[in-house]
Image: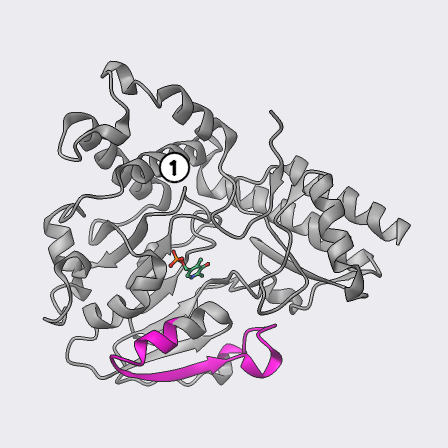
Amino acid sequence: MTRVYNFSAGPSMLPEAVLKQAQSELLDFQGSGMSLMEMSHRGKHFSTIAAALEQDLRDLMRIPENYRVLFLQGGASAQFSFIPQNILGDKHKACYIKTGAWSQKAIQDAQSYCETVITASSEDTNFTDIPDASTWQNDENAAYLHYTSNETIHGVEFNYVPDAKGLPLVCDMSSNILSRHIDVNDFGLIYAGSQKNMGPAGVTLVIVRDDLLGKCAKTVPSVFNYSEQVKNQSMLNTPNTYSWYLMGLVLQWVQAQGGVEAIEQHNIAKAAKLYAAIDASSLFRNPVEKSCRSRMNVPFILADETLDSAFLSAAQSSGLNELKGHRSVGGMRASIYNAMPDSGIEALIRFMQEFERTH
Ligand SMILES: *Cc1c(COP(=O)(O)O)cnc(C)c1O
């Protein structure tokens, strides 16, 4: 068996230790004679897993007592609609920072429920930077300020937490959660799909401050009503039990790496190495302004795009998979989430240097 380096943007590679543990427990979970997949979500084994999942996340992110942690379904995409419906309350506006494809989608969906005020937009630079905070226009009558901390497609990441000027700050952290230290107290609501940095697809994490609960529109299905899910420990309907389990294993792996702060140092070093190689090359180029380059998703363009398909097929033959950029931006993209080891970054850099030498 040969495992490749998988640079997919998501679902993305998982730590090998997690896959091996899952494999070893697949048929007989801890002497129960059953797979965890076959067990009741109300039973003893799964209850233990669910409690540990929440506690481990609270420990890793130092989530304060006045925040609820929900594990929902429907992906981050469902939250684009359910956030406004849950927390607008009697307000009719919400502010959004538009820095790429994902914040754009969040805005589009929110427009069905409220007026969306664009606090700042980098659309005029093709989403290659973040407008200076001094130019932002917040509306003080808005219910919240939303931003996307890492734009997975455009490779743009905030290296700071925006000042929401008193509004509750709402953040889509799908592609950089657990990759860097954040202070949860700065946020009203954090949400993220599981399939980039936390596990396989199928779980949507919502971390919400208590004062934002209890305002949900009556038209919202109860499985997407945060207060209802809080009352039911995210089990108003049958959860995606196996994904919860795998996410729990990933959290334990993060703990074993030294926690979020240790992982962050590792991520800084991995991204710096790859950007340095791109910047030193005359064939490859990263289009993003240096101060907001993503540590997680590194897009790069070949000077001669007729070489794109040769690059991709040669990369794949070298065990470097899923490097094709998103169809909306083209070029290449290396997603280097927490689970991507140093050896994967080094193999990619060696391959790129060799490709440049021979083309
Ligand atoms: C992947 C991604 C999403 C969409 O996640 P789904 O789980 O497919 O709904 C949303 N926002 C960001 C930043 C993403 O990277």
Q: Quadrant of residue 6?
A: top right
Percent x, y for residue 186? 34, 62
Total numbered badges shown on the rendered structure: 1
Q: Nearer the viewer, residue 270 or 330?
A: 330
Task: Indicate whether 37 appears above or below 196.
Answer: above
In the picture, the quarter occupied by the N terminus is: top right
Q: Residue at x 37, y 41 (%)?
A: 60
Secondary element at image label 1: helix
Q: Quadrant of residue 168?
A: bottom left
Percent x, y for residue 231? 10, 50
Q: Residue at x 38, y 48 (%)?
A: 194
Task: Indicate whether 333 appears above or below 255.
Answer: below
In the picture, the quarter occupied by the C terminus is: bottom right
183 drawn magenta: no
Q: Which residue is mark 1?
A: 251
From the Cβ of disc 1, is ligand 1 less than 8 Å away? Answer: no
Split into quadrants, the picture shows ligand 1 in the one at bottom left
120 drawn magenta: yes
Q: Residue at x 19, y 65 (%)?
A: 212
Q: Quadrant of residue 341?
A: top right
Q: Nearer the viewer, residue 125 or 324?
A: 324
Residue segment shown in magenta:
106-133
Q: Nearer the viewer, residue 213 or 202?
A: 202
Looking at the image, residue 131 sits to the left or right of residue 303; the answer is: left
Of all residues, the one furthest to the top in this rendering is: 31
Percent x, y for residue 196? 46, 49
Percent x, y for residue 225? 16, 61
Q: Residue at x 16, y 32 (%)?
A: 40
Under mark 1, the amino acid is Leu
